[in-house]
Amino acid sequence: MGTPPRVIPRPEHNISRSNISRNALKVMYRLREAGYQAFLVGGGVRDLLLGREPKDFDIATDAHPEDVRRLFRNCRLIGRRFRLAHVYFGRDIVEVATFRASGDEGEAGADEALVVLDDEGRILRDNRYGSIDDDIWRRDFTANALYYNIEDFSIWDYAGGVDDIRAGVLRLIGDPEARYREDPVRLLRAVRFAAKLGFRVDPESERPLRELAGLLDSVPPARLFEEVLKLFLGGHGVASYELLRHYGHFAQLFPATDRLLDSEEGDPYRALLLAALKNTDQRVAEDEPVTPVFLFAVLLWGPVRLRAAALEAAGEPPIQAMLLAADEVADGQQGRVAVPRRITTPMKELMVMQLRLQRTRGRRVLGMLGQGRFRAAYDFLCLRAQVGDADPALAEFWTGLQAMDENARVAAVDSAARREAGATPTAEPADDGAEPASRPRRRRRRPRKRKPTGGAG
Ligand code: ATP
Ligand code: MG
């Protein structure tokens, strides 16, 4: 494919070394001193051209992974499907990839490097090394296929990426359908970059997005988990979510949630998802931490709540019902998006705490404040209250309680208990969490069996 690149010399672009991480520069200079080519590639170049701060800096070189390892003491080779060198600088990792060729061009790497496709044309293995003008054609979008040359600070553009970036267009290199089939994760990458960059997807690249959504079921669930995190916790969750729903990708990733969102019972959950994602985007913008536990609680809450209501109706006590439902829904999800146990376990806890937070009287209530998951559970409750999935008075109760000093807290839960005791002859009920917030006046007692949706008072 010997087309020469368009070379954009340093004076004609805005990428300055002062915006590239010191560690990435170090790696490139070292490679170059050793006689190799070294380019900054991918999102680093794209984001710098757009005047954004790149998430990370990826480097491409003609040095083989073993060569890279010899040059850097702090280097590890990773990946079998796709061999890469990781150079460590404390917590910062610079990823170094060797130029790759596709098809039967290119030289074999040291250890039986090969391109392996499955029956449907998916790439299972891609370790055939080549030169930069082979490498370019296996990148996904033109905007991601720009190379910044450390030798003279020019940008090499083989696929028209610079013009596409200036026009705000996301365009797959080559035949879009074939490229999506090769690696269906590119469907999600299209959505992610469109959402993140605010680009429109070129019509040719857009057309298959919906048609080929079904291919996502052939992607290993562990890889989809990684993509889901990038889609929803990358600061553009709302835009990503809307595009995923639009193209039918969300149905592939979260089938139970997707069905619920489209049903009559979907009402508060649509709003809950949007409110939570909006909140998450805001936090990312303000550099506040976000957690996958909260994200998956939000994504799965609807189906869990419905299932829990059904189990309760069949006689399970509320907490047990919630636990069973959360287990079922989380298990059902694993075949699509493999959510690790370190996330599902605290997620279930957060869900069960939604029931425990319904109790507002007696001193045991104060113990909730000290629990590890309290903050997340409280935030979740507030979101639910905001969209009509929980009693706003309940959220207010917990907001108020946190603002009080110790004495006032004791008085608050005691007087609530006295009021309740006066109102009902029975003492404190079993710890089934089914008690509504004790609110003066307006509050009526609710029947035990609440409708699963719309628990707002
Ligand atoms: P960001 O890091 O901001 O999410 P990025 O473009 O750097 O975006 P990475 O996943 O870090 O994305 O990948 C780096 C580069 O590797 C991409 O820009 C692209 O050129 C190439 N690449 C990554 N994944 C794929 C893929 N599935 N198919 C083709 N090329 C890919
Ligand atoms: Mg990157």
Image (cartoon, helix red, strand yellow):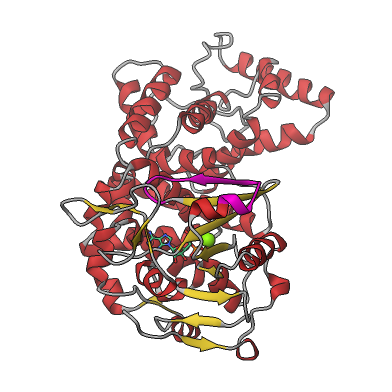
Find the residue positioned furthest to the bottom.
12
Residue at the far left in the pictured view: 119
| Nearer to me, 353 or 143 | 143
Q: Position of residue 288 (x, y in %)?
A: 68, 51
Q: Please provide percent x and percent y for residue 366.
A: 71, 21
Front residue (pair 290, 92): 92
Q: Is residue 81 magenta?
A: yes
Compared with 369, 131 (above or below) is below
**Is residue 48 something one can see in this rendering?**
yes
Q: Residue at x 50, y 66 (%)?
A: 196
Residue sitting at x 67%, y 68% = 20
Question: Of 274 and 194, which appears nearest the observer?
Answer: 194
Residue 429 vs residue 320, the one in the foreground: 320
| In magenta segment, residue 59 | no
Screen quadrant of the N terminus: bottom left
Left or right side of 54 for 212 = left
Q: Is 403 rendered above or below residue 145?
A: above
Quadrant housing residue 427: top right
Question: Does 66 sit above or below residue 336?
Answer: below
Residue 143, located in which quarter of the rendered image?
bottom left
At a point 50% along the width and 68% down the height, the residue shown is: 42
Residue 13 in the image, given as x and y percentages of width and height? 61, 86
> Where does the image place residue 279, in percent across and percent down from the top left?
58, 53
From the viewer's perspective, tell me whether residue 17 is left or right of residue 322: right
Read off the magenta span: 69-82
| Residue 275 visible at all | no
